[in-house]
Amino acid sequence: MTLPKLFQNPFRRWLSRSGGGRPTVLVKQLHERDRRRMMKHFLTLEKSDRLLRFGSALPDELVAQYVQKMDFSRDMVYGVYNSLFKLVGVGHLAFAPKDKSPAKSVVTDKEQVAEFGVSVSKSMRGMGVGSKLFERAAIHCRNNDVDTLYMHCLSSNKTMMHIAKKAGMEIQRDYGEADAYLKLLPPNPSSMLQEAVQEQFAMFDYTFKANARAAYKLFERLPGRKKPVLPPPPAE
């Protein structure tokens, strides 16, 4: 389904040009109101994708439990919405005291370390969604006195390995699994401004897409709108 021009983002062309010819990926912080769409995103992941994201091919019941237990007041969750207001990427940034973190071999003077996990819908692979989610998580850690960002995944997870190498993370492999660590710089006025501006742009984009989606649904229900003609059922 494509939206009529009336409901398309007026900044879409500008965003595409600023992204070097492909749509700019805008990453927004997710909240409780996004939980239902997060559930849909994770449940539509194929078995192989769940294996890469969670380390095992979780059944629907456990995926649902993971989403329901997500604590937005403790952790940071980021998402990318496409033009149809569908959640196509989710990054989960979880914080833990350094003595209880799985990244025990990392040396840090800070009280916490952060662990990052990401999933991207099949339709958006190769568009830089995972990398943008990671960058947003990293700058949040930097601005909140966390100097170590940690990722754990299967060594066969090419997407996570690509993100880790691109970010310059130190990677340790062991028995088919991999741990990656990134030491972050201290915050400065530029990094603080960068995070705030990114969220403002993403919030504008989110609001426009949500309103456009609602307006389009109302438009489709207007009297006189022609219903789509469905093809006849196949002959038995």
Image (spheres, grey):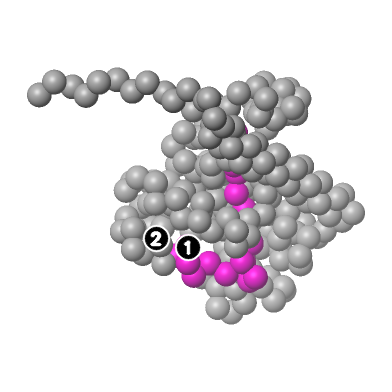
Q: Amino acid at mark 2?
A: Val
Where residue 99 sits in the image (x, y, percent)? 58, 79
Q: For mark 1, what is the residue?
A: 67
Identified at 72% across, 57% down, the residue is: 140
Mark 1, secondary structure of its residue = helix
Badge 2: few (under 14), some or many (20 or more) residues near its Cα, within 10 Å?
A: some
Identified at 57% across, 69% down, the residue is: 71
Q: For mark 2, what is the residue?
A: 63
Q: Is residue 164 above or below residue 34?
A: above
Where residue 220 sits in the image (x, y, percent)? 54, 31
Identified at 66% across, 29% down, the residue is: 7
Judge left or right: residue 185 versus residue 127: right
Q: Please give the label number shown on residue 215.
A: none
Q: Amino acid at mark 1?
A: Val
The residue positioned farthest toward the bottom in the image shown: 99
Q: Is residue 131 above or below residue 169?
A: above
Near-viewer residue (214 or 192): 214
Q: Are marks 2 and 1 in contact (CB under 8 Å)?
A: yes
For the question of whether residue 167 can be seen, the reply is no
Judge left or right: residue 200 versus residue 116: right
**Quadrant housing the C terminus:** top left
User: Which portion, as a residue range, is magenta?
Assistant: 66-84
